[in-house]
């Protein structure tokens, strides 16, 4: 039995109608009067338009969110809300199916993921549930389902592609297997396992230069971006040439070219992985362009 506070049990317009209800009750005017504040009447036209769009969404998109913390939906709250923000802009209600990556196997992955219009693997740490995420990415790639990998989700996409498209058997991340023969995800240059993990996370805003004529460049509509990071491991530069020759596009790099920030598969409508966390910059009335691109591809994929 779900607790009463689970967010999807709420009627979404209620969350965004609060300013309208306050204004209708004239509470803001009373507060301003009592505090002696001279304030103009608020312009709520943009908010009213948003609420109307939420009320009258005509399409439903099924998104499979595959992670290791799905028992607590708030662990992915920013991602879930960013998905919904994109839906508001595209006249689409987002129906999230929460999938525990530890439960996915070769036997059930098809039945579990086939009904989805899009698949997203968000961030996380540690080796638990990783093989289920790799199965998810492989299924999305082979069945041409829109895929969005965020932070860990990008690293998973690189590992899966290395194993099954580039022929690098048992490829992995140092985080999950330090003895893997092909560590396609590894420490940043100059790091080692002796350093305290908390002090080696790449945190905060970093710039990125996007490759022309890529899906991600089309989503942003610009060549240079800046996004927020929270991770420790990076794409291993020693494998750049091998994975590019196998068909992986390194679509975004740090300005000095040393760090791979984004990857994608050029032949897919949307198969994108990013090292950063775009969900942190999404807003109800200003959805993040990558989530808009992902949901648009999922809308186009509706079964």
Image: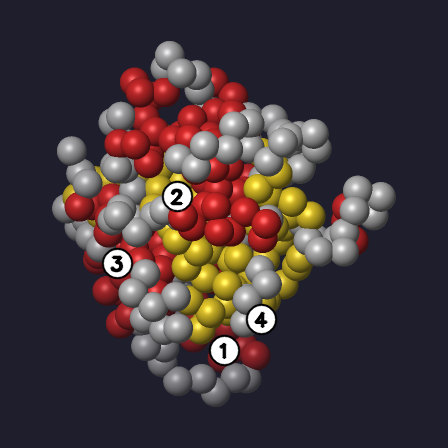
**x, y percent for residue 244:** 42, 50
**x, y percent for residue 149:** 44, 44
Tell me the residue that label 1 is attached to.
32
Labels 1 and 3 touching (C-beta < 8 A): no
Q: Residue at x 36, y 77 (%)?
A: 42
Tell me the residue that label 3 is attached to.
89
Disc 4 secondary structure class: loop
Q: Does label 4 or label 1 sit earlier along the sequence? A: 1
Q: Is residue 51 above or below residue 299?
A: below
Tell me the residue that label 4 is attached to.
256
| Observer able to see residue 186 | yes
Labels 4 and 2 touching (C-beta < 8 A): no
Q: Residue at x 51, y 51 (%)?
A: 240
Disc 3 secondary structure class: helix
Left or right of residue 234, residue 153 in this image: left
> Marks 3 and 2, how far apart in space?
36 Å
Disc 2 secondary structure class: loop
Instruction: Between label 4 and label 1, give the one nearer the viewer.
Output: 4
Labels 4 and 3 touching (C-beta < 8 A): no
Q: Does label 4 or label 2 sit earlier along the sequence? A: 2
> Marks 4 and 3, how far apart in space?
35 Å
> Marks 1 and 3, how far apart in space?
33 Å
> Marks 4 and 1, how far apart in space?
51 Å
**Within 10 Å of the Cα at label 3, are there few (<14), some (14-19), or many (20+) other Cα atoms?**
some
Q: Does label 4 or label 3 sit earlier along the sequence? A: 3
Q: Is residue 9 above or below residue 154?
A: above
Q: Nearer the viewer, residue 126 or 26?
A: 126
Q: Nearer the viewer, residue 260 or 22?
A: 260
Q: Residue furthest top?
A: 107
Left or right of residue 196, residue 302 in this image: left
Instruction: Between label 2 and label 1, give the one nearer the viewer.
Output: 2
């Amino acid at each position: 039995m779900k607790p009463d506070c689970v967010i999807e049990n709420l009627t979404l317009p209620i969350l965004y109608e609060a300013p309208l209800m306050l204004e209708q009750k004239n509470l803001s005017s009373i507060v301003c009067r009592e505090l002696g504040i001279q304030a103009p009447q608020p312009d709520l036209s943009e908010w009213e338009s948003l609420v109307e769009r939420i009320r009258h969404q005509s399409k439903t998109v099924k998104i499979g969110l595959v992670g290791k913390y799905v028992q607590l939906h708030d662990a992915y709250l920013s991602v879930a809300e960013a998905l919904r923000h994109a839906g508001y802009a595209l006249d689409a209600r987002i129906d999230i199916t929460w999938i525990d990556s530890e439960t996915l196997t070769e036997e059930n992955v098809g039945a579990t993921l086939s009904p989805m219009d899009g698949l997203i693997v968000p961030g996380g740490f540690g080796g638990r549930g990783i093989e289920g995420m790799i199965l998810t990415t492989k299924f999305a790639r082979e069945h041409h389902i829109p895929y969005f990998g965020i932070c860990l989700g990008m690293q998973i996409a690189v590992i899966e592609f290395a194993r099954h498209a580039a022929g690098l058997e048992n490829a992995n991340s140092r985080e999950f297997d330090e003895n893997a023969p092909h560590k396609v995800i590894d420490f940043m240059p100059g790091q080692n396992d002796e350093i305290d993990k908390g002090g080696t996370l790449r945190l905060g805003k970093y710039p990125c230069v996007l490759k022309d004529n890529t899906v991600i460049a089309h989503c942003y509509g610009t060549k240079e971006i800046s996004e927020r990071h929270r991770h420790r491991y990076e794409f291993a530069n020693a494998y750049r040439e091998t994975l590019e020759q196998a068909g992986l596009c390194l679509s975004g790099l740090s300005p000095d070219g040393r760090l791979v920030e984004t990857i994608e598969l050029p032949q897919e409508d949307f198969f994108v992985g990013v090292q950063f966390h775009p969900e942190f910059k999404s807003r109800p009335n200003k959805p993040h362009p990558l989530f808009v691109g992902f949901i648009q591809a999922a809308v186009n994929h509706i079964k």
